[in-house]
Amino acid sequence: MINPREPSRRDFLAASAVGLVALARGSESLTREESQPDGELLYIGTYTEGAQRDGIYLLRMDRRSGQLRQVGSVDAGANPSFLAIHPNGRVLYAVNEIDKYNGRATGAVSAFAIARKTGALTRLDEQASEGAAPCFVSVDRNGRVVLVANYNGGSVALLPIGADGSLASATHVEKHTGSGPNAERQEAPHAHCIVADPSNRFALAADLGVDRVYVYRLDLEGKSLRHIEAGDGVMRPGAGPRHIAFHPTLPLVYVACELDSTVATLRFDAERGALSPLDVHSTVPAGWTGVNYPADIHIAPSGRTLYVSNRGHNSLAVFSVAESTGALALEQVVSTDGDWPRNFSLDPTGRWLLVANQRSDSVVVFGRDQESGRLTPTRQRIALPRPVCLRFLTRAGGTT
């Protein structure tokens, strides 16, 4: 399971069963807990394995101390690894990162209603993701469609959202083509994320296998995606683009590149829907030569600090962001106090940063200086099996 040639979620796909039913036990465990108004509700998506049934965990975080407490869990089917919350805060979506669903070569996407007082999840439905191993899900900024990236399928899909938050079957699927110079990891397309831009007129999709960030026009009326080929961001050969973050005020997109341990800056023309590469920075300290695969990327709401997680180096890279230009400078690299950090999240107050260490089964809390963005270790952590994705309920609608 700790083979550096298989650095991500694919560790568990071969052994996964569909298992997208029998949620009552988990839902009851969520609703039994008392609501605590002073805490932030946080959902954790995980990889399931063996006898493990529950895959989405509900935590409550104390705003003052950063302390985490588990208040429930739910059986969400096999490998509910990546999560997204509807902008209205009433529905949670999870990919089921599997290669087979209902006898077809596809994964699935599940939808859950969120109880307003407790955060308890009640299953609404699931749909095929129309590609194997879906690894990323997001909701457009108006809450009308779900967007999914299928890693093994090398495709992205659009699924309409019903009035109650349930999902319709996919109305549009785009299959990527091509390959990259890394024969082991880029033998074919591997779509890794897809998110709507701030204007909600475009969707950007990073494909690790073909070193490209695709630009699509997002048609909410026609429930479709239209590829703008001339607008694609062509990355450095072998970079392996994975996740992206939009600057909150500048026309910039930052891309975490998994295969060459870099973060790339691209300019985004939101009138034409076009990306232009600008700059590249390493996510690890100068001179370090070990195996490393960046995973997640987020920018603070202020736009002054950018963060990238490093699997292998097991750290968070902290970049300052120039106010007028968006230029990056590496200011800090801090250990995640765990093994194989995947996704991470700033809490709604901006005082804390939480990171999921997949291989050491832990979620760790860092204190955050809201002026400099620098991170400080704390004693706060919680043990959870194979955590991947963190989503605060009060940040519903956030895509990066």
Image: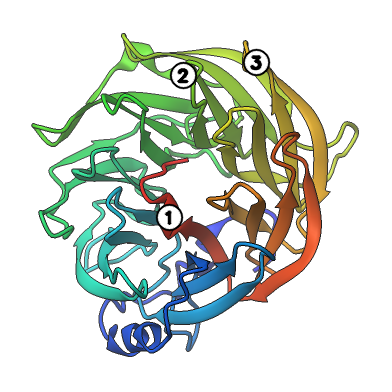
289 left or right of 245 in image: right
Residue drawn at (49%, 81%) of the image: 71
Q: Where 202 falls versus 376 (above or below)?
A: above
Residue 202 lies in quadrant: top left
Q: Is residue 14 above or below residue 142?
A: below
Label 1 to label 3: alpha-carbon separation:
33 Å
How far from the left and from the top, in percent, is residue 49?
50, 79
Residue 183 is at least partly visible in this image: no
Identity, as a three-letter code, of the amino acid under mark 2: Gly
What colour scheme governs how the chains and residues are painted in the rendered image of this protein? rainbow
Pointer 3 residue: 279
Residue 57, position in %: x, y?
A: 47, 74
Which labelled disc corresponds to residue 233?
A: 2
Q: Can you identify the residue that label 1 sits on?
A: 394
Q: Earlier in the sequence, mark 1 or mark 3?
A: 3
Real-space Cα distance between discs 3 and 2?
12 Å
At label 3, the amino acid type is Asp
Q: Quadrant of residue 304?
A: top right
Q: Amino acid type of disc 1?
A: Thr
Q: State left or right for residue 17 relative to residue 312.
A: left
For image coordinates 41% across by 59% down, the residue present is: 393
Within-10-Å neighbours for mark 3: few <14, some 14–19, many 20+: few
> Judging from the image, what secondary structure is the residue with disc 2 in?
strand
Secondary structure under the numbered disc 3 in the rendered image: strand
User: Percent x, y for residue 213?
Assistant: 44, 26
Front residue of 285/344: it is 344
Q: Could you classify mark 1 by the number of other residues whose Cα lies within 10 Å: few (under 14), some (14-19), or many (20 or more)?
A: some
Residue placed at 32% from the left, 61% from the top? 92
